[in-house]
Amino acid sequence: MKLLLKILFFLLAIFCTNISEAKIFVLDDRISETVFSNAFNSENSKVVLQRELSGSDFTNTCKSERDLVDYRNLAISSKADAAEEGVHSFGSLKNMSGSLDDAAALARNQPYGPNTNIFRRLPNSAQDAQALTEAQAGMGRNLNIKLGDPTYQGWEKWHHSVGPKGSKSVVHYLRNPQTGFLTDFKFK
Amino acid sequence: MKVKCVADKVSIEKNNKALVDWANNSELEITIGKTYIVIAISKYLNFIFYYILGDESDLYPLAFPAELFLITESKISKYWETDLTKIEFIEDINIKNGDVVSFKEWKFKGDIFYENLMEEVPEFTLIFNNYRDKILSE
């Protein structure tokens, strides 16, 4: 009987410490990121993180629905990582924290990470939008450099341009050759 | 060193698939008949590439396959860190994949220099602009 109780207690302890769930909902006008831990662990029983970017935030952040593509790209990848490895997997993107604040900083042309330069990330014209869309589809060419930042080791830097000679829209972005994930789109 | 653009697409017939795939997934920012000053030379995929200021930006050079150009002035820049004084033919360039022939900062820092230039890190932009202006006015 004691042995049976010990086994039950052991199984219960495993159940209480290991279960967690991360969800990211991606809709046309909002992204909500929710991380739950199991209800048996008193420290983690509350919702760890639940945030939503409202439609008005996106109105301020993005000029068009097209700009949401980058958010979707980020969120979908985060979701995949979260499903695979748990909450801690948010750190494997260019947006290293995986937080929506950082995603918003990227979209608002704010400085991001250690590089304090501000790059334009939003399209100003139909030609820009086309260049960005095509880059997001993986068009362009590899600049053949090995990135020095240890965070992005093995990543590729790509270049894509669209438009008439002398006035092209040029987009640079990063590509993870292992997963095909594309991020850090910026106009040059 | 100056080169004249003779083609703006990599020939499918003459080249291996890797180079064709690399080049033909995006329009190259060069113009047939235009002469460009070579800022650096490198090698990728076992092909020699010239770094030149393309048609879109003077802020950073881009790499284009050497086969798209003819050498019109073989004398190389005095600011380059190399034993060579001139390059008559592509075959004269004996470097390994990833090596860079250019001014010393780029040659020795390699990809780190180029990455920081593309990221517009002021220190690297300043160095590049300095050499660019000198090389263009030689």
Image (cartoon, coloured by chain):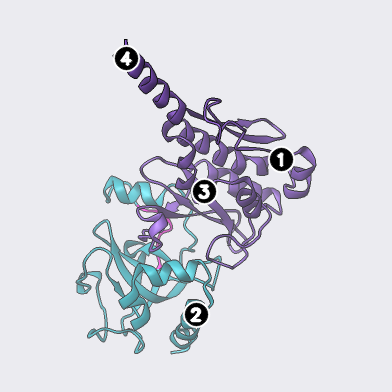
Name the front one of labels 3 and 4: 4
Label 1: state its secondary structure. Answer: loop
Give the residue displayed 46% in from the left and 63% down from the top.
Answer: B32
Taking A53 as reference, is B22 above or below it?
A: below
Q: Which residues are magenta?
A: B5-10
Label 4: state its secondary structure. Answer: helix
For the residues bearing labels 4 and 2, Cβ distance under 8 angstroms: no
How far is disc 1 from disc 2 in space, using C-alphas? 37 Å
Q: Is residue A187 visible?
A: yes
Taking B90 as reference, is A11 above or below it?
A: above
Q: Which residue is mark 2?
A: B123
Q: Which residue is mark 3?
A: A183
Quadrant location of the N terminus of chain B?
bottom left
- Marking on residue A53: 1
Give the residue displayed 46% in from the left and 88% down from the top.
Answer: B134
Give the colour of chain B.
cyan
Q: Which mark is first along the chain, 4 or 3? A: 4
Label 2: state its secondary structure. Answer: helix
Give the residue displayed 43% in from the left and 71% down from the top.
Answer: B52
Work out whether residue B57 or residue A49 is closer to the camera in this orientation and state it.
Answer: A49
> Extreme front residue here?
A2
Give the colour of chain A.
purple
Residue type at numbered disc 1: Leu
Taking A67 as reference, is B103 above or below it?
A: below
Compared across the picture, whether B138 is left or right of A161 comes to left
Q: Which residue is mark 4?
A: A2
For the residues bearing labels 1 and 4, Cβ distance under 8 angstroms: no
Q: Which mark is first along the chain, 4 or 1? A: 4
